[in-house]
Amino acid sequence: MCGIVGYVGNRPALNVILDGLRRLEYRGYDSAGVAVLDGRGGLAVERKAGQLRNLEARLDELDVPFEGTAGMGHTRWATHGGPTDRNAHPHRDGTGKVAVVHNGIIENFAPLRAELEAAGVELTSDTDTEAAAHLVARAYADGPTAGDLAASVRAVCRRLHGAFTLLFTHAEHPDMIVAARRSSPLVVGLGEGETFLASDVAAFIEHTRDAVELGQDQVVTIRRDGYDVTDLDGNPAEAKPFRVTWDLAAAEKGGHDYFMLKEIEEQPTAVANTLRGHLTDRRIVLDEQRLADGDLRDVDKVFVVACGTAYHSGLLAKYAIEHWTRLPVEVELASEFRYRDPVLDRQTLVVAISQSGETMDTLEAVRHAKEQKARVLAICNTNGAQIPRESDAVLYTHAGPEIGVAATKTFTSQIAANYLVGLALAQARGTKYPDEVAREFAELEAMPDAMAAALDGVEAARELARDLAPSRAVLFLGRHVGFPVALEGALKLKELAYMHAEAFAAGELKHGPIALIEDGLPVVVVMPSPKGRAVLHAKLLSNIQEITARGARTVVIAEEGDETIRPFAHHLLEVPAVPTLLQPLVSTVPLQVLAAEIARARGYDVDKPRNLAKSVTVE
Ligand code: AGP
């Protein structure tokens, strides 16, 4: 998830672009760069790894004039290629006349890079994006779209697979920018004698609130006096005009009061982006695998190490990996792992899950595992972070930057990534045939839609939150994959609402915790599907009856249409019906909303809970 700004107008483009990038820096801060058309056939480009201020310092040092009233900028959240200067956007073709900035993932970048190298093109970065600059330059220079930048962009975009927002400038066209989008955001801002492009409206609402949202597979050409939109074949296309009513602070949060609320809603996209490109020819392909199938085939035990929410996603990994591969899986809190002297060897696979990739407890667990000759696979949301750097392989989640301290979209993205690891292990060990792997992957790919449906149904959770806000404590119950979801729901409530919340495996209730049940005590119960493991559904139904008989106030998360549960639920929060192992991806959503809204009702800062940090880099 990167930040993109484009501008064609009558003011110095550099200042407009840098202001816009500052508004979008929350979308990515691995590197930043700008390209400005000087109007005399020149295209000045500068880029720098690190935060935007590094680029600004670099620009201040330069004596190169970044004059011109058209240009574009980019702040990067690295996906392919580490956060370095050479991988920073904009990328250019060999002539330096074409520049491109990109948000998204071009899945077929490898064959495109190979095609270019075979044609003698020298590629200078490790990114998926750079190929697009060379391809557009070649289409513009020769052939049916020669001399026509928009037609050249359309021709190239027709060849791309994956998700992209791409902006192209050409030195011979100082009065235009051509952009294309597929499954990645792009909006046009319409000013007086100036036109903007951006990943989101925060970049330009101080200049104009008149905007246009582009549709799927559309190409827009902007000039200072306006824009035109086509489809990928060049046919005129309609885009949706709208007026931005948010203020700047709200715009950065997508109209929400808090980043966390926006990030809860970004989960379908985050999971879709995490899954994107990982199944080719019915085979699971991990990112920078560096673990050959043979290495995965030799694995005879799996350890999952993580902290907090990442640990809860690890508990879910255990169910999937054991079910799909018959490998024994131990899930261990990273802070405990190395102190209990675990039995590890070269045939042990340690999966280290960390959204920040900097959590010291998890990093030290990785180091311990490496000392014991185990192979380490990192699941991380931050390209180039310390944990993936010290691991043998990495599978990146593509949730984009998560600003809220409480993990939400990175949690559900981790679940998707864990399941990819499980399928890769099953594939390598032959415990699943390619058609079975493809079928499980297809069920995963259907989850963003199910999660979007779950998000459509969270109003009941919002209303209930106001009701529960005065509660002194809340218990959470679950069985099977519902238990880690209960743990995650309790953690969210603790860290956001500072409320005592505790989760139990429902079967444990009778072994002590049932003594906690008293009149009016809220108990959240995460129900399995009645169509899944019927025995679990029946046992949880009994648990609900046990606690209601003792005065509990039940909040039941259940599958839509599960009528058996309705008479026993004081409050019913319904989620879409999905396969058993995938239920956590939908049942977590109302719990995230419940915790955030209780915190809001209590007047707390949902994005910055007290005593907490987004990344715990101390042990
Ligand atoms: C979760 O909401 C918390 N922010 C915290 O438990 C977090 O999951 C934990 O610190 C692990 O962080 P990591 O994923 O960056 O390693």
Image (cartoon, rainbow, N blue to C red):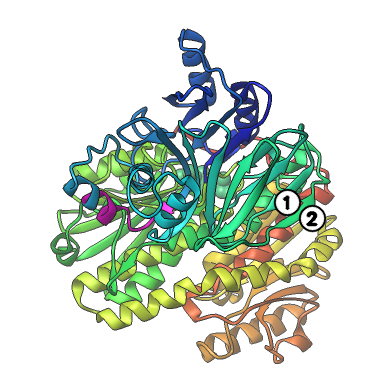
10 Å crowding of disc 1: few (<14), some (14-19), many (20+): many
Tell me which corner region of the image, top left, top right, bottom left or bottom right, holds residue 201.
Answer: top right
Q: Which mark is residue 539?
A: none
- Is residue 205 a member of the stretch shown in magenta? no
Q: Main secondary structure of the magenta part?
A: helix
Q: Are marks 1 and 2 in contact (CB under 8 Å)?
A: yes
Quick check: 580 above or below 266?
A: below
* Residue bearing mark 2: 472
The residue under the point 81% across, 44% down is 246
183, above or below 97, in the image: below
Can you see residue 514?
no
* 91 vs 514, nearest the viewer: 91
Q: Amino acid at mark 1?
A: Met
Residue 176 in picture, x, y percent from top left: 57, 38
What percent of the width, then of the height, locates residue 367? 27, 39
Of 489 and 383, the residue lying toward us: 383
Secondary structure beneath dot 1 equals loop
Q: Relative to residue 615, is residue 277 drawn left or right?
A: left
Residue at position x 83%, y 43% from top?
603
Residue 109 magenta-drawn? yes
Q: Nearer the viewer, residue 243 or 545?
A: 243
**Between disc 1 and disc 2, whose residue precedes?**
2
The span from disc 1 to disc 2 (Cα, nearest Å) is 7 Å
Residue identifier under label 1: 499
Q: Which residues are magenta?
A: 105-114
Whether label 2 lies within 8 Å of ligand 1 gets the answer: no
Q: Is residue 216 visible?
A: yes
